[in-house]
Image (cartoon, rainbow, N blue to C red):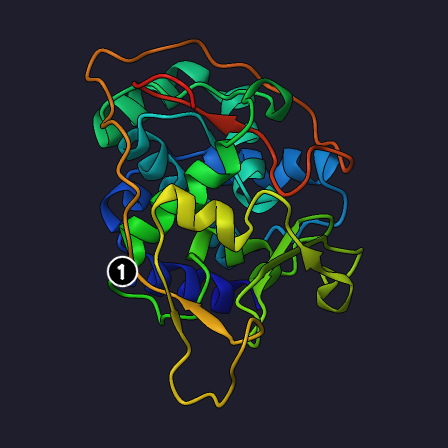
Amino acid sequence: MGWFEAWRAVKHIRNSPYQTALAALPAGLQAYWQHSAPQEYPGIPTDAFFFVRAAEGLMNFFDVVTRSGKPCALPSEAADSVWHAWLRWNPAGLDYFCIKHFGCKIPHIERSELGAGALLNSFVRCRGRQGATLHASALPALFRLDARLKMRGGHGYWNRMFSGRVVYVRLDARGLGRRRASPHPELTQDALQAAGLKYQRSAGVASSGDGAPFAFLGGDAGGSSFDDDCSAGAGDSGYDSGSSCGSSCGGGCGGGGD
């Protein structure tokens, strides 16, 4: 069935908003990832379709970082698996790729060094970037990636229908876990509203009082744009199933922190 997964990968690239960047991924990266990723992420699928979706998530994150101008946390282990492989395989080539397609080098920063607000920065910028095309109650694609891919040990995010709360759980060995999810402390409605996202009562739902459901509206919290002169070295970190709640590593480019 390898041919079918390869065909799906090609079709996915053609329909991706990051088609140009994905088509320019260096020859050899996928093969290196297929060989090395299972050593760092036991049980990770290594077919072409999984790879291209994980790589698309990484392109999405690079886009978010450069547009935010603030440190951002990566909410996907699948995307981070491609980043880690690329850093080991050809870090200089990765820097060149980022400069060419996203305007600057993007450092790989351990989650513990990102500081408070990095995950919120990613969420808000993703909403601002994709709000016009997402259903009001949907989470940004980058935050849904691991759950959609059933990434073992990945980050599972969902938006609860009746409360509008963003809930999170570390995915289990089967890439599942929605029933165990609980509200994410960094992505509360108050935090998102303070960051600039807007809410409205969900249409067509009969409810009243403080428990009335809310849905996301497209909105952009702003934040400084990235600096053309931004650059920093890249570092690598191992997979840690006990990492800070809700994200893998992260990156920053341009503007200062929170």
Rendering coords of residue 189 (x, y %): 51, 55
In the image, residue 76 above or below residue 48: above
Left or right: 11 with respect to 52?
A: left
In the image, residue 63 above or below residue 252: below
Taking depth in this image into account, of 190 and 42 the one nearest to the observer is: 190
In the image, residue 244 above or below residue 197: above
Q: Image point 55% across, 43% down: which residue?
A: 75
Query: Can residue 58 be seen?
Result: no
Residue under circle 1?
Answer: 14
Q: Image point 33% across, 18% down: which residue?
A: 105
Taking depth in this image into account, of 47 and 141 the one nearest to the observer is: 141
Q: Quadrant of the C terminus?
A: top left
Q: Image point 57% across, 29% down: which residue?
A: 249
In the image, residue 11 above or below residue 92: below
Rendering coords of residue 3 (x, y %): 49, 65
Q: Quadrant of the N terminus?
A: bottom right
Rendering coords of residue 185 (x, y %): 64, 45
Taking depth in this image into account, of 59 and 19 the one nearest to the observer is: 59
Looking at the picture, which amino acid does disc 1 mark? Arg
Rendering coords of residue 59 (x, y %): 37, 41
Q: Residues within 10 Å of mark 1 (few under 14, many from 20)?
A: some
- Residue 112 quadrant: top right
Taking depth in this image into account, of 2 and 38 the one nearest to the observer is: 38
- The local secondary structure at tag 1 comes to helix
- Residue 23 quadrant: top left
